[in-house]
Image (cartoon, rainbow, N blue to C red):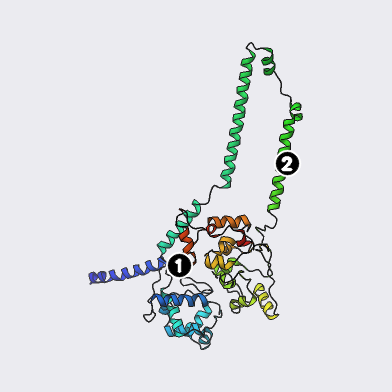
Amino acid sequence: MSINRSLLSVPLRFSILMMLIFQLSGTQVYAVNPDVPNSEEAIAAGKTVFNANCRTCHRLDSKNVGPALRGVTDRHSIEWNKKFIRNSQALIASGDAEAVAIAAQFNNLVMPAHEFLSDTDLLNLLSYIEYGDKVDPAAAAAAVDGASAGTSAGSGIPSEYLTIILGVLVVVLLLILIVLGLIISILTKYLGNQKLDAVDEEFINQKFDFKKLLKSDGFVIIITTIVIAFTVKTALDEILTIGVQQGYGPKQPIAFSHQLHAGQYEVECQYCHTGVEIGKSANIPSANICMNCHTHIQNVGGKEGISPEIAKIYAAVDNNQPIEWVRIHNLPDLSYFNHAQHVAVGGIECQTCHGPIQEMEVVYQHSSLTMGWCIDCHRQTDINSKGNEYYDKLVQLHSNSKEALKVKDIGGLECAKCHY
């Protein structure tokens, strides 16, 4: 009997061990409802629905403003999910235990209704939630390591090392002067013991006259040249900084944190700056755009009451008054810059010009935005011509060159491109 008991305990212990391994490794295994489609078309369509309606508050595999969504068809039925997505408040008001529990877990935060979504939209959305954008941990780790290596490789020589190198060079020059002085001293003593004519003897025995050096024409010319060069250099530096506001970060009427919105909650830049892909200007968001989220989110981190900064948005809407944001990035009127051309066509990331915007508590001008800065970018940036027939002829004309097609090769250095 004892033998049978021990044999039966083996699979039991093994199952417990496997369960512990899954728990400790953080791996979550979900039994996706078989009625959820897993085709690429459904996943792609569901991603579009997710990005348009859910991305601001939800993530697939981690908590955000709302719960992590992956595995939702394992935790709840498809019909229940449809009801909750369409109108969560109605489901909560009906007394549904699961809906009430979720609302309590997230501080009764109100989720907007999505009555306009069809059954197909909802199924596609669930398809993306269950099957879309799954990250391979090993690949993610490799990508992080590669990015770290690339960052360190392109970081250049630290300024501290340059200071040390300059210090070493100064010491070497001083040692050379000392050695030359010793050589001159030895040669002078040696020649002093030799029979020399009067002229050579006078040259060797001459004494250094410091006052005479200060009054000499050569010394006056050298000092005057140095002073003029330093004055001109200082004046040119000051002239070249006129209109350059790099580092400018004024206080705004509402303490809007890009670190919180774009960083922690990963709100897309295009959600607030609606014109960035379709027009010349990126657009400063109106209070109505803010209210898309802050109708339901009244404080930070689930705190009770209304945040004083969010209350300013409510006041602007109630009084029908625009929020008077202070402009930071301001190009001169003689320059033309089109956001859509750079973002939609060129595929330039916002951070390329605006710096690590997702890390800024208070936004400041990261780049100099000077003409030289823009021209350097045009000289170095490759043209992505794939899938764009506009570039076919240009690529053909550039085919004999060994270098990649760059912005400078398609008129990026022509004056009239930016100064019209």
In the image: residue 207, left or right of residue 279? right
Nearer to the camera, 366 or 2: 366
**Dividing the image into 4 quarters, which one contains the C terminus?**
bottom right
Amino acid type, callout 2: Ile
Give the Cα separation between the discs numbered 2 and 1: 56 Å
Q: Label for residue 387?
A: 1
SS type, badge 2? helix
Instruction: Tell me if 352 is positioned left or right of 287 in this view.
Output: left
Q: Nearer the viewer, residue 151 or 303?
A: 151
Q: Residue furthest bottom?
A: 94
The image quarter containing residue 209 is top right
Q: Where does residue 223 sit, x and y in percent of width and height?
A: 72, 36
Name the amino acid, label 1. Answer: Gly
Tell me what residue is drawn at x 74 percent, y 37 percent. 224
Q: Residue at x 63, y 73 (%)?
A: 285
Q: Is residue 265 left or right of residue 77?
A: right
Instruction: Using the rendered image of the protein, determine whether residue 156 is visible from the camera's viewpoint.
Output: yes
Point out residue 141 in the picture as x, y percentages from the top left corner.
Answer: 43, 60
Q: Residues within 10 Å of mark 1 (few under 14, many from 20)?
A: few
> Can you see residue 384?
no
Q: Residues within 10 Å of mark 2 (few under 14, many from 20)?
A: few
- Residue to which mark 2 is pinned: 228
